[in-house]
Image (cartoon, helix red, strand yellow):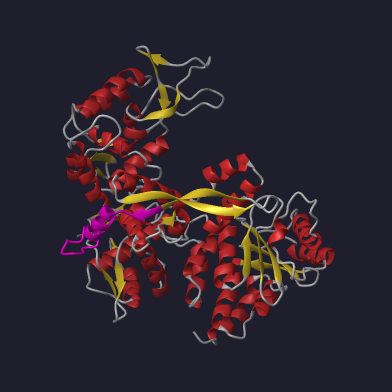
Amino acid sequence: MSITINYYPTTSRKFATGLGQDVGSLRTLVNMLQIFIPNSLIQLQAKEVLKWRMVGDDKRKTDILRKLSNSPVRLTVSELSAEIKKVPGEPAPWQIKGVLQAIMPGQKQAVLQDGSLVFHEGHSVRAAMRSWPIRNFLSTAIGLGLLNWNRITGDVSLSKDGYQLAMAEHLDGASLSEAEKSVLRSSYMSYPYAVGFLRALEGQEKGLNKFELGEKFGFAGEGGFTSFGEDLYISSMKEAYKQNDKEMIKTIRSNWESTSDKYIRGLASTLSQLDLVKIDSKPIYFTDSKTNKTSSFSIPVYSLTGLGRYYLGIALGRSKHKRTTKIVTWDMLATKGNVTYVRTVRALILKELTESKGLTAEQLSKKINENKINKKQVLQGIIVSPEEVVDHISGLNGIGLQIDFTMEHRYELKDPISDFEIPISAKDLPQKDNVQREQDELRPLLKRLDHRYLQLVELALDSDQNSEYSQFESLTMELLLRQLDFKGKALGGSSKPDGIAWDDEGNFLIVDTKAYNNGYSLAGNTDKVARYIDDVRSRNPKLDTDWWKVVPESLDVKTNLRFMYVSGKFAGNYLKLLTALRTRTNARGGLTTVEKLLLTAECYLREENYTHQRLLDDWTNNDIDHKEYFPELHELLKNSVI
C-alpha cells in the first residue's frame, strides 16, 4: 500500500480515470477487455472491421493492427477511442478512427451525404460511437482495476483481474455468465463509489431514489457531484401532468438530473445487472385541482438485495471477511473546478493516513503542508487548514472509503488502498483559485451550517449554471427551507420566481438567483421580479401562470412581501436599479451575496436573538458589498456561542 508523489518537469498525460458516466452495458465492458486478448473472437472481429472502416490513415491502421497482435496488447487512449469529427451540416462519418469503435456501434444508422444508408457485405452499418462514451468505459474499467493506464507512456493494458474476466465463460447475447458476474462483483467491491452507493442503501428497506442518494453521494455538493433535488423534480412533474404537458414531462424525465443523479442511475444499472441492487418504481400521487381526480406517475427507487448485503459485508470486512483493498486513482478525487489542487490535497490526506495509525485534523494539516518533492513543497505558498481537511475527509467518506473519527479526535483510515501516484506537473502546479480562497475565509466561521453549502460560492460564479433549472437556485432554496426554518417551495421555470418562502410570523419572500462570472447588475431583470410581485398580489385566475396558488392566502403580501436577489457578487449601478424596483413595487427588497447568505445563516443557527426578522432585514438592507456587511457579521459570530 504505497502512495507516491511523482514530479513531471513537462506536461504529463491526462485522462480522467476511475469515474465514468453512462456505462450501462456490462457485456460491452467485458467485450472491451477481450480486445486485449490476441486472437480472441472479439479481437478478430474488431480487426476485420478496422480493415474496411479505418480509412484515410494507412500508417495508423498498420500500427494499430500490429499492436493488437503483440502480447501483451498495449494501446493508447487515443488509439482506443479517437473519433473522426463530424462536419457541421453533414452526416456523421461512417469511418472509424479508434479500435473500440469497431465493437461499439452507435445508435443511429450510418448514412452518406445523399441520405442513403451505408452497407457492407449486404448489411446496413451503424454510425460510429462518439469518443466520450467510449472513454467512460475505459475510465470505469481502470477504476475497477480491470485495465491499467500508464501516465508516462499513455498506454492502456489488461490487468490480472481484467484478464481473468476477459477469459471467463462467455454466453451468447447480452447476458453475463455466472463466472463473469463473480469477477465483476469482486471488482465492484474494490471500487469506492460502488461501495459508497451500497452503503447508502443499507438499512433503507423502502429504498431510495436517485435524488435522495445524490444528495450524499461522492463529494456531495461540489462541482461534478451536485444533485438536482427531489422536491423541485417532483413538484414540476406534478405540474406538468396536471397541465397534460407531454413535452414538458418528456423534458423533465430526460434532462432534469445533475451529475450525481447520473452517476447514481448508472451505478444502479450496473449493480442491478450483478444482482446486488433491486430497482423498483415508487408511485407519486397528486390531485388535479380542476377535476379533483387523483393520478400518479412513478420514479425509480433502489434497494439492496440479499446478495448486495453479502457483498457489502465483504467490502467492509464484516463476518470474518478481509476488508477489500479499495482502488483509488488521483483522477477520481475531483471531476470539476480546480481539480489539480483538490485532487492533490485529497490524495495527500490519504497518503498521510496510510502511513499512520491515526492523526488529528491539525496534524494532518501540518503534514500535508510540509510534503515535498524535489526539495520543494508540493503546495507552494498554500496553507491547508484543519477545517479544510475535515471537509475533504467528509467527501472521501462519501465516495465509499471509511475514515473514522476516534474518541481521541484522530482520523483513522480503515480501508487498505491500492498503490497510486500523485502527479505533480511543472506546468500545472496545485494552486488555490479565488473561489477556494473565499471558501477558506468562510469555512472557519461556519460552525453550525453544513459545509456542503459552501458550494454556493462556486455555483454563484458559474454562468453555465444560469439556466431555468439550475443547481444554484435549488441549493439556495434548500438552505432556506431545510436550514433556516422557512416554509416554501423551489419553483423554477419560466414566468415564475426561482423560489418563494414564508414563516409563521407572516413574512413572505420572493427569491431570484443569478449566477454570473463577473457579477450581476440587475439590468434587464427588474421587470420580471415586478411581475412576480404583481402576480402574487393580484392572484388573478386568468393569468397564464398560477404559481402563486401555493402561497397561503392568510399571508399579507400587500405589506409583508419582500424580494431578494442572490448572486456571487453584484456589479454596475445595482443600487440605483434596486431603489427604482423598490419604489415601483412598494416592496422591500435587497441584493444578497452568497457570502452574506452563508454568514447570516450561521448567525441564525447560533444566535437565539437572530430571528427571521433579522435575517430578512439583513438580506434586504443596503449593505451589499463585502466591506459593508462582513465586519459586523464577523464580529457577531466571533462573540457568539458555538
Residue at point 53%, 53% (across, down): 284
Quarter holding residue 521: bottom right
Residue nearest the observer in this picture, 149 or 133: 133
Residue at point 31%, 64% (across, down): 348
Position of residue 5 relative to residue 613, above or below, is above
Q: Is residue 609 left or right of residue 82?
A: right
- Magenta stretch contains residue 553: no
Q: Is residue 361 left or right of residue 482?
A: left
Q: Is residue 98 left or right of residue 472?
A: left
Query: Please, which residue is most extreme toward the top here?
Result: 122
- Magenta stretch contains residue 323: yes
Q: Quadrant of the N terminus?
A: bottom left
Q: Which residues are magenta?
A: 302-328
Q: Is residue 397 left or right of residue 260?
A: left
Residue at point 28%, 75% (across, down): 359
Residue at point 23%, 35% (across, down): 74
